[in-house]
Image: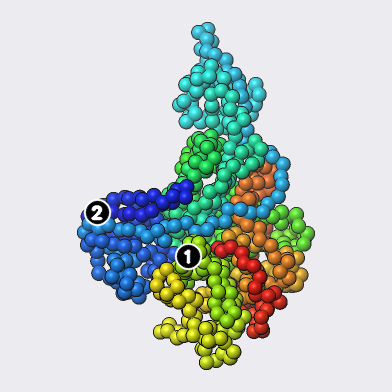
Amino acid sequence: MQVRFVWQEQRNGRWQKKERVVKTSGDKTILGLAREHGIEIDATCGGRGRCGRCKVIVSGAINELAEGETLRLTPEEIAGGVRLACYARPRGDIQVDIPTSNTELMQILTEGSGQLVGLQTDIDKTYVVVEKPQLENPLGDRERLLAAVRQKRKDIFAIPLTIMAELPETLRKKDHRITITHWQDRILAVESGDTTDSLFGLAFDIGTTTVVGSLVDLHIGKELAVAARLNGQAAYGADVISRVEYASNGASQRRRLQQAVLDTLNGIVTELEERSGISAGKIGRCIIVGNTCMQHLALGVSPTYIARAPYTPAFSCQIDITARELGLSICPEAAVTFLPNIAGFVGADTVGAVLATGLANSSGRVLIIDIGTNGELVMSHQGRMVACSTAAGPAFEGAEITWGMRAGEGAIESVEIDDDVEMRVIGGTRPRGICGSGLIDLVAELLRVGIIDETGRLQNKDELQGLSSELSQRIRTSELGNEFVVAWADTTAEANDIVLTQGDIRRLQLAKGAIRAGTIVLQRFLSIQDGDLDEILLAGAFGNYIRKESAMGMGLLPPVPLERIRSVGNAARVGARLCLISQAKLEEAARLARKIEYVELSGRSDFQEAFMEAMLFPHVSHVSQDSTGIDKKLPRDRAI
């Protein structure tokens, strides 16, 4: 049997049709086949049949609809040949069309605030003239090259075999005038002629959902190009635990996850090459950050015991390898460094964020929060830093929410409620769903007007007084409980009502409760009261695009004056870039990873108590201002 996959990919702003034909015996689902052949189909639940995101259009011989599909697909979708890839299995030759909405990129945060540092890279170039061979002195090319190099750099003695293979031709191309790229005691590359004016490096932040990379001119420290993509591992689950479980099934599954993220990295390299005009083969240095699990998977190392008590990673230290060993498509011998991790669920991305924000040098009471599927928090006071990690889950990114979606075209990105619902949609199109920033806005507004109470209960319309008729008719009861209609079917792209259900609210409560409880534990650890916090730094995409008033209104953040809350963008990538251009910062990163104290929350009674408390929403007076005293009509930020 043959399966023809058809999908669209966006390159340089243009959509291109892609096809791939694979053979199967019919024992694998469409999702399983796609994973096996590196074809991306979104499946935020990891293929467990729970999220309903892996919609594809199938034509040809296919198995009967499963009960899980009938629950998650509309009659119109079923009639149009839509199936869930995690349930559908070929029974003959078929074609699988992957909708663009399943593969399109979300809005990805690439920028971040950082600090000025002196340019002092740990990679350099040296131009030398090598003595030509003579009959009376038949030294080999390698020996004559090393003799010339050691006149300027006595510490260099290692030449990799990959360079040796091309050395005779490289030497003679420019009459034995060459430039070597070197790192520590190793030669990374040998080029004909004088190329000392071109020295380039990469900085990557491998996130659970997205990957961002930047190309940097290491002579001047200037960023030449930035590119971002969804992490190709997303097809194996939206959260870290789903991927750990998948990788734990065996070496082949682990290699598949590794290849998925390497394909993403190499895709970004290609894009950076196209944008900058710099050949990838000239890139000789790379710094990578990511959470502990992402670093393990990128290196092909088993993450199994990160998810099992006592949550032990296979490594925490800095890892140095070559691009060839990793499978990164740049200069084969380029030095690639993975920054050190702090603990099983607090990784190098947190080290990068601490480095970028200068937290270690702050004497004040400062909190950094990176809110995602795995919330990472660091609190500092007078140079002492403590960190923890909370399993927030994917609700903040729209996953496992009935009409949740990533922040792509058609996502409701902000919501205001007056007499009726006002919203803003990414791309100005009809809405297809709601992304994280819109979800936070919506719940905060429903709390403010009293439709949701402090316990998170979506109230019946007959319990509410003073609601407009427009709002009142949006509250209704379904077989799953109460729900609130955010957008009516005749205004949406899907021709279905977009709703917020009671279950959605509970999932959001669990996510915000975990983050807030982690904050409370760190505050108690350092004896810091809410009002004592001098600054809250919001890192990552969520922190950059979320509206502070809404986050405060639903109790996600400690109650402090809004001017103390600041977004620092993609601080993890900024930290990686600092290490790329400054050897001093690279050394500081290693010290930080050892200095930051890790607080394990699991099993702590104070965390459980704080979590139960944090599950509740703040008390809100139902007037025109929210709980922070800020008028609800403030300008909105972009979406996550």
- Residue 240 vertical placement versus 286 (above, below): below
Q: Amino acid at mark 2?
A: Gln
Q: Position of residue 208 (x, y in %)?
A: 51, 58
Residue shown at the point (60%, 69%) measured from the top left: 515
Q: Residues within 10 Å of mark 2 (few under 14, many from 20)?
A: some
Task: Please say whether residue 68 is visible from this viewpoint.
Answer: no
The residue drawn where x is 33% and y is 70% is 77
Horizontal and vertical percent position of residue 640: 55, 63
Q: Quadrant of the N terminus?
A: bottom left
User: Which residue in the protein does label 1 denote?
Assistant: 429
Q: What residue sits 66% from the left and 24% below the top?
A: 152
Is residue 171 among the parts visible in the rendering? yes
Q: Where is residue 510, by image quadrant? A: bottom right
Three-letter residue code for mark 1: Thr
Residue found at x 42% / y 68%: 493
Q: The residue tagged with tag 1: helix, strand or loop?
A: loop
Q: Which mark is residue 606?
A: none
- Between disc 1 and disc 2, whose residue precedes? 2
User: In front: mark 1 or mark 2?
Assistant: 1
Q: Is residue 365 left or right of residue 448?
A: right
- Tally the numbered discs: 2
Question: Which residue is labeled 2 in the image?
Answer: 2
Q: Give the Cα separation between the discs numbered 1 and 2.
A: 37 Å
Rendering coords of residue 322 (x, y %): 52, 39
- Could you tell me residue 602's position as x and y percent? 58, 69
Q: Secondary structure at mark 2?
A: strand
User: Considering depth in this image, is 136 or 260 the residue closer to the camera?
Assistant: 260
